Amino acid sequence: MKRGASEKYVLDNEQMNELLKMAQTIEDRLILQLMVLLGLRVSEVAHLRADWIKDGEIRIPRSQPCNCSNCQGEWRSKSEASVRNIPIPEGIGKEFYTFLGQSPEGFHLSRQAIWQKVKTMAKRAKIRVRGLSADTIYPHVLRATAASRLATAGMSAPALCYIMGWASIEMGVHYISIAKAKEEAHRQLKQILH
């Protein structure tokens, strides 16, 4: 089913917090946080391993050997822009390091299993996103939510593109322009109504 651009379905803070509350295990919580806070792609989460972590960063490689059914021997990042270092926030660091210490090979989940986990948690959280039915929240919405949150917080277009692994600066500009338009609309509405 064609859904359109993911930024149309960005979760608000309340929805994001409700979704995070639905994580019943450390694994579920980390999967959600890696996507909704750091903007990792489903494929990156599915293939993340302890050897990606160095000096407090997730270092996404260009490729790595993989024996999952999707990769046929080698996982490859989406593009050269996808090869990047993402700082691990303090808020998730302790759990993240504990998890990878116990599971150095990562989550042992397929992209489809992660997709299903996200949909199941969103359904339990009763998240309703305009334009999507209740059971069609999909992982890229979490990535779009991360991009939107970073843009709203004031991240520059080049920095946003780097963190998200986008090759085109236009994507960063796009998310920032949406964030600025929303901020300006709220400011103007408050001014008009007061």
Image (cartoon, rainbow, N blue to C red):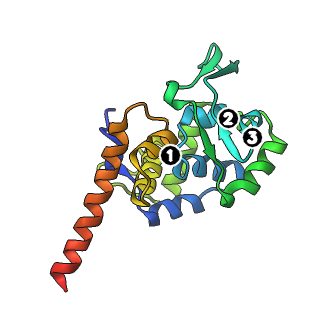
Between label 2 and label 1, give the one nearer the viewer: 2
Q: Quadrant of residue 13?
A: bottom left
Between label 1 and label 3, give the one nearer the viewer: 3
How packed mark 2 is, by other alpha carbons closer than 10 Å (few <14, some 14-19, many 20 or more), is: many
* Residue, disc 3: 54
> Which is more N-terminal, label 1 or label 2?
2
Between label 3 and label 2, give the one nearer the viewer: 3
Q: Residue at x 43, y 58 (%)?
A: 127
For residue 173, side relative to residue 155 (left or right): left
Q: Gap in Å between the C-alphas at discs 3 and 2? A: 13 Å
* Residue, disc 1: 119
Q: Residue at x 66, y 50 (%)?
A: 88
* Residue, disc 2: 48
Quarter containing the C terminus: bottom left
Task: Name which residue type carries label 1.
Answer: Lys
For residue 123, side relative to residue 130 (left or right): right
Please determine whether, in this image, residue 63 is positioned above or below residue 135: above
For residue 101, side relative to residue 123 (left or right): right
Instruction: Tell me whether the residue at label 3 lies in contact with that at label 2, contact meaning CB atoms closer than 8 angstroms.
Output: no
> x, y (%) of residue 148?
40, 53
Q: Gap in Å between the C-alphas at discs 2 and 1? A: 20 Å
SS at mark 3 in the image:
strand
Instruction: Tell me whether the residue at label 2 lies in contact with that at label 1, contact meaning CB atoms closer than 8 angstroms.
Output: no
Q: Would you say residue 25 is visible in this rendering?
A: no
Q: Would you say residue 46 is visible in this rendering?
A: yes
